[in-house]
Amino acid sequence: MSATHHARRRRPRTYRILAVAAGFATVGTLAAVIPAAAGAATTSEQGKAKPGRYQDVQLLSFNDLHGNLEPPTGSSGRVTEKQADGTTKTIDAGGVEYLATHLRKAREGQKYSITAAAGDMVGASPLLSGLFHDEPTIEALNKLDLDVTGVGNHEFDEGAKELARLQNGGCHPTAGCYTDKSFEGADFPYLAANVLDEKSGKPILKPYTVWKKDGVKVGFIGVTLEDTPGIVSAEGVKGLKFKDEVETINKYAKELERQGVKSIVALVHEGGLPASTDYNYDCDSPGAGDGISGPIVDIAKNVTPKVDALVTGHTHQAYACTINDPAGNPRMVTSASSFGRLYTDTTLTYDRSTGDIARTAVKSANHVVTRDVPKAPDMTQLISKWNTLAAPIGNRAIGYISGDINNTGTESPMGDLIADAQFAYGKELDPETDLALMNPGGIRAPLTYAAKGSEGDGVVTYAEGFTVQPFANTVNLQDFTGAQLIQVLKEQVSGSNAAAPKVLQVSSGLTYTLDLTKSGAERVVTDSIKLNGAAIDPAATYRVATNSFLAGGGDGFPTLGQGTNDLVGEDDLAALEKYLLANSSAADPIAPPAADRISVVR
C-alpha cells in the first residue's frame, strides 16, 4: 500500500450559490488584541499592495458524516438550540444538498479557506452509500471541495485495502464497477499518522499534509483513536498497529516545524462529552473547557503547543471549546456533531512574520446545516443517480411494524428485536442455541412507523433495515460456560466499560438486574441472572449467538472472544429480515418489544 497520495488535479471551486439565511452559531473565542486588522495590506514603495502581517484563514470543518447523503431522519436529523430565555428549540438539519449550499455560502469572499474533516466520513452508512461501498460519499466529498480528512475507526470497517481504494480509486474487488465509469477515489488526502503497517512500521497513508496559498502554510496531522481495534472487527484491523494519539501528533508537529510549517491543526478522531447536548452550549462557562469531559480533554492537555487547534469527532457531540495546552495557553477544540447536521467555522489568524497562528485571535462557531436554503443541484443529481441504482434493492418490503421501534435507552425495543432475530436464526443453525447478545453501538437507527417513501405506514423496507444494521457482520454461534456468561455480563460495567457502560441487548428469556447504585462489576446482580426463569449454572455450557464483531471480543468484551465450537452464519441483516418476514404481515404487524428484560435500579 502506497504511503503517498497520488497527485490529482483539483477542480476549481464554484461560488454560484444563492444568498442563504445566516446559520445559528455557538462561538468560542480566544480574546486578544491584534496589532493590525487581519488581512490589512500595506503599500510598497512601488505603489503595489503587499499582504499585511496578519491574514485571516477560514477553516470549515465537520466530522462523522457516516455516508448520510440524504437528510437523516428522526432524532438523527435534528439538533437542539438553547434560546435566550432558557428554552430549547429543535431544528431539522443535515443532508449534503444543504451542507454544500451552506459551505459554499460560508466560503464567499474568503480568499483563504480550507475545508477539513475528522474521520468517519464513511462506514455505518445508509443504504444509498453503504450498498456501493461508500463510493457515493467519496464522490459527494469531492464535490464539497474537502481539502483533507483524518481517518476514523469506521474507515477500517472493510480493512486497510478498501480504505486505500477509497483514496486511490479503482473498482471494488468483488462487486466490480457500479457505473460505466471507473471509481476515481478521493480528491483529498486521507491522513492516518498513527495507523502503521505491522510489517513495515510505516503509516499506511500520509501522516500529514500542508495546505499552501500565497505564502500562507497550514499543516494538518490526522489520527484516529488508539482504541480503534477494540471497536472495529478483527478482520478490519488485521496487520495494523494503532499508536498513541498524543505521541503521534507531537512527533509529526516537530517534523512539520523542521520543514518550516509552524501553523498546525490536528484532525483527531476522538472526542469529548459537553455537559449539554444543545449545539450552542458554552462549554467554556465558567472557565476554559470546564463544561466538557471525555478522552479529548486529556489529549488536548498533552498535545504540544506547536499545534494551534484540534478538530475532533467520534462522540457525535457539538462543541467549540478552549482547553489549555501544556504551556497553559488556551487552544480551540471543536466538533460538529454528526451526519452533516453542523459545520464549524473557525478563523485562524496567520502571522506572516512568524508563519504561526496568533492563537489569541482564534474564533470558532458551530453552524446548523438548516434545510431552509436551496439544495445544491450537483448534490441532488448525485443522490438521484445512486438512488436509481439502489431503488430495486432498497424498496423491497421485509416486514411490518405497528409502531415506532426505538433504539434509545439502557435496553431498547430495537435491541430486543435484533437479539430475538439473532436468537431465532441461531436456533435455525443449531437447535441447541440458548440466547443471543447484541451490542448497542451496532444498532444505528430506530425503525419508524411513518412511511419514508411510497411504501406505506408500518412497512419496513430493506433500506430501512440496512440503516439499522449496516455493518454486514455475520451471526456467529459459540459455546460458553455459565461462569463465562456471567463474566460477559459483568464486562458491560467493568474493565474498559467501567466509566461508560455498554449494556448488551438480550434475547427473550434472559433476565437480570442492573443496579446502578453500585460500582464496577457489582452493578450486575449475579443471583438475578436467569435464563427462562432458571439461575445460570456456572458449570453448564450455553450456546450463544452474537455478531462477528462481539465474537471477536469487540467493545470491551474479551470473554466473548474466548468462545469455543464456533459456527459462522449469514449476515445480521439477513437474520433480521428472516425474523420480520416470519413474524409479521400487513394484517398482523409486529409490536414494539416491551424492553423489560433488564431491571434497572437507579
Image (cartoon, rainbow, N blue to C red):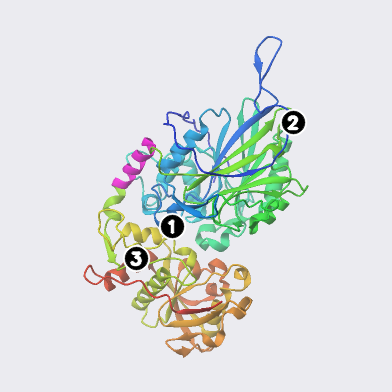
Seen from this angle, which residue lies furthest left?
587
Residue 196 at x, y percent in the picture: 61, 52
Q: Measure the C-alpha gap from mark 1 to mark 3.
A: 26 Å
Q: Is residue 386 magenta?
A: yes
**Which residue is denoted by mark 2 in the rendering?**
354
Q: Amino acid at mark 3?
A: Ala
Residue 261 at x, y percent in the picture: 69, 35
**Circle 1 SS class:** helix
**Circle 2 SS class:** loop
Q: Amino acid at mark 2?
A: Thr
Earlier residue among tags 2 and 1: 1
Q: Could you tell me if residue 243 is visible in this image? A: no
Q: Magenta residues, as a range?
A: 376-388
Q: Residues within 10 Å of mark 2 (few under 14, many from 20)?
A: few
Residue found at x 73% / y 34%: 33
Q: Nearer the viewer, mark 1 or mark 3?
A: 1
Question: Residue 574 — which label?
Answer: 3
